[in-house]
Image: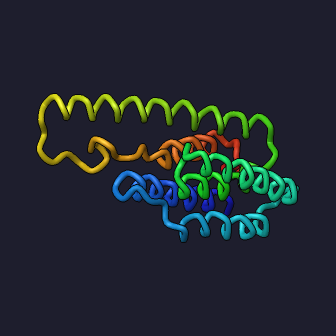
Amino acid sequence: MTFAIAIILSLMLLAVALFDITKFIIPNWLNAAFILLYPIFLIITPQEIEWWWSLAAMACFFAGGMLIFQFNIMGGGDVKLLIALSLWIGWQGQTLLAFGLLVSIVGGVLAVFLLLSRFVIKLAKVKSPPRVLEKNAPIPYGIAIAYAFATLIWKDQILGLIV
């Protein structure tokens, strides 16, 4: 049954990536769905989960996310996504570190790729490039966040979802 949750989470992450790359927005209903799916997982999983540590991690991500948003490092949707997904990661040290590292690496690669693509489009004088490749378009970091979380799900590092 937890495998079904892994599939649902993966489809939701795909939706995050599609919304972010096409509209530069991560809908609040998707972030809420990540949070609302967690108690369902707690009810159906046979393993004992220390859910209060997940709430503590979420509170820390909320505080850190406010700073990240305040300094305009990430958009509000990206920060809300990080907060919602932190509930699933909890206080698992290695998983938390792997998640942060993956988000950073994939986000950096994505940013470099988009900046280079925008430069090439400018040189080629493309009249109407896709919105994500326009000169001052934001970097859709939700893609990197979704990719990192999906990777951890399928490497069985998120609360034994694949067991």
Note whether 71 is above or below 50 in the view shown: above
To which quarter of the image does residue 114 belong?
A: top left
Q: Residue at x 51, y 60 (%)?
A: 12
- Position of the N terminus, as image quadrant, is bottom right
Can residue 159 be seen in the rendering of this structure? no
Closer to the camera in the image, 41 or 17: 17
Q: Residue at x 21, y 29 (%)?
A: 120
The percent coordinates of residue 14 (x first, y second) are: 46, 54
Q: Residue at x 67, y 53 (%)?
A: 66
Q: Is residue 100 left or right of residue 92?
A: left
Scheme of colours in the image: rainbow
Can residue 124 be seen in the rendering of this structure? yes
The percent coordinates of residue 21 (x first, y second) are: 37, 51
Q: Residue at x 80, y 42 (%)?
A: 92
The percent coordinates of residue 53 (x first, y second) are: 86, 53
* Number of numbered callouts drawn: 0
